[in-house]
Amino acid sequence: AQTVTQSQPEMSVQEAETVTLSCTYDTSENNYYLFWYKQPPSRQMILVIRQEAYKQQNATENRFSVNFQKAAKSFSLKISDSQLGDTAMYFCAFMNDNNNDMRFGAGTRLTVKP
Amino acid sequence: NAGVTQTPKFQVLKTGQSMTLQCAQDMNHEYMSWYRQDPGMGLRLIHYSVGAGITDQGEVPNGYNVSRSTTEDFPLRLLSAAPSQTSVYFCASRQGGSGANVLTFGAGSRLTVL
């Protein structure tokens, strides 16, 4: 079974600075997708960024970017110019292309300090 | 607004009681799923459906029952609630086919079993 590991239960960063959240996963598949979801105190799950495993180029969405290292099975999220509104739980998730079971990591609680 | 609607948002049950968490989506998504979120464990898949009349088990299906009689609705039933089922439950949906299609989540339902 696929597993997703987020080794940082909590992190903090000063406003306007950069922070990187780590995620590793385990799979024997070649075609899969990786996601980062944000869960603010409202509890709503919000997609931050998505990466297809067959794409070598790292995905970027405004201040959010990933470092996807397929051989190392690593998928870290970099948040640049951190804002107070980035304070949330962040979940890394993995999904094979040929099944319907999305696996989530345990989450990293990020606090952005003014 | 289009999206995934979950009801109720909060519920308190006594051990042994039954209840149904409702989930409806108006995006004509083929795939629907239920997750539970527990502290330190991320989200775990309970059951999912790839279309009306088709359901399957996820990672933690015991104690839960589902059915999919229409494309729009995917209720989750607890037949005899146990304290171990205290959790936050999320319904999510997406277009069928590729795992690249993004999950849209409902706002969550917090269930407490006494």
Image: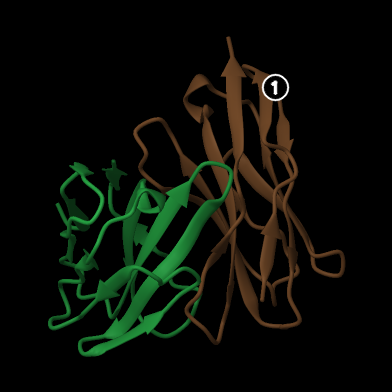
Check the picture and name the quadrant holding the C terminus of chain A. Answer: top right
Vertical side of A20 occupied by B102: above or below: below
Residue B106 visible in the current orientation: yes
Q: Is residue A21 above or below residue A41?
A: below
Q: Position of residue B1 (x, y in %)?
A: 14, 51
* Residue A47 coordinates in the image, percent (x, y): 46, 52
Disc 1 residue type (three-letter): Glu
Q: Quadrant of residue A108?
A: top right
Q: Colour of chain B?
A: green
The residue positioned farthest toward the right in the image shown? A72
Colour approach in the figure: by chain
Q: Which residue is mark 1?
A: A17
On the rendered structure, is A70 left or right of A89?
Answer: right
Residue shown at 28% from the left, 80% from the top: B30
For residue B10, say whether it is visible: no
- Chain of the residue where label 1 is placed in the rendered structure: A
* A83 horizontally vs B51: left or right: right
Q: Which chain is brown?
A: A
Task: Determine the residue positioned at 45% across, 75% down.
Answer: B58
Residue A67: percent from left, percent from top: 76, 53
Task: Residue A56: give x, y in percent of width and height.
Answer: 75, 69
Local SS, label 1 = loop
